[in-house]
Every structure is written in structure tokens, then in C-alpha cells.
Image: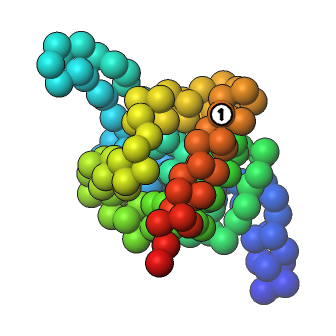
Amino acid sequence: MSEHYETTLENPNIKFTQMMIVHEFFHLLSGIGLGVEITNDETGELLGDFNGFNESVTQFLTEEMLNLKMGNKVDYYLGVDIVRVLVENEIIPLSVLKEAYFKNDFYLIQNQIALYDYDLVTFLNLFDKVTFNKDERAYEELKNIVNNIILAKENRSI
């Protein structure tokens, strides 16, 4: 009986279902997570309502929790790749990412990105294009931004 149980857990359909359940559960735990609406401080004009980063982070945390790498089997895989690079290079340390996500505190992320003088609206807009449209051009642009951040971080090291 235990042999059947172990093989069932290895079934790709079961893993995908587990992944979907954890992903949606994380959304519930985080409130709206890292979805963010940005307005111009002076005019009050809505600059964007961004959710791509939130979905990519949710999927990243799901895969980390389940020790899975779903790759292109999930819609958000390009965004997940970028989140993984941000975490691995401590641009956004995993502890900060988790705290920001589960406390629904986007300012923690904004503060990390601000360290490297990158426009947050552009960053989030690219994440939306990458996450929801699988836009390869936006993916390359986002990778360039992240690579520049990594280089800036390395150059600041003592």
C-alpha cells in the first residue's frame, strides 16, 4: 500500500494539483500580496495597477515550498525566473521577499529596488508583460535591468 502512495505522489498531475492549491492558498494568506497600484504623488494620476510581480512571487514561493521547478509548465515561468535571480543575488533577499509578501507590504520591495535607482513603474510594467503575456522582448529588457542591478551591487561591495 505504501508503494502505491509513493508512486501516486510522484505523479505529475498530482504535483501540478498540489502546486495550484499551494499557489492559491498563498494568495489567501497574503491578502493581495504584492499587487500594487501606483499613482503620481503630485497629480494623483494612476500610473499603473500592477499584478505580474505578485503572481511571479506567488509562484516562486510555491515552488520553493514544494521543492519544485515547474519551468514553462506554468504561465508565470518567465517572471519566476527573474524573481529567482533577484533572490539568488540578494537584490531582494528571500527573508525580505517573504516578509513583504505575507505582510502585504510592497514598500519593502520598493525600498530594495530603490537602492539601485531603477524606475519602479517601468520595473513593474515589464513584470506584467513578462508574467501575463510571456513577452520575450520585455523579458530581455527586464533581464538587462536585473543584470545591471547585479553589476551595480557588485561594484558597491567593499
Q: Is residue 114 above or below residue 46?
A: below
- Asked if one can make out residue 90 in the rendered structure from this viewpoint, the answer is yes
Q: Residues within 10 Å of mark 1 (few under 14, many from 20)?
A: some
Q: Residue at x 54, y 52 (%)?
A: 149
Give the percent coordinates (x, y) of residue 87: 54, 63
Quadrant where the N terminus sits is bottom right
Q: Amino acid at mark 1?
A: Glu
Residue lying furthest bottom in this view? Answer: 2
Give the percent coordinates (x, y) of residue 140: 71, 36
Q: Is residue 133 above or below residue 22?
A: above
Q: Residue at x 75, y 30 (%)?
A: 136
- Asked if one can make out residue 132 in the rendered structure from this viewpoint, the answer is no
129 lies left or right of 34: right
Q: Nearer the viewer, residue 2 or 33?
A: 33
Q: Nearer the viewer, residue 17 or 115?
A: 115
Q: Nearer the viewer, residue 109 or 62?
A: 109
Give the percent coordinates (x, y) of residue 15: 72, 61
43 lies left or right of 118: left
Give the percent coordinates (x, y) of residue 51: 45, 33
Q: Residue at x 28, y 16 (%)?
A: 46
Q: Residue at x 82, y 63 (%)?
A: 11
Q: Which residue is mark 1?
A: 141
Secondary structure at badge 1 equals helix
The total of numbered circles placed on residues is 1
The quarter of the picture where residue 25 lies is bottom left
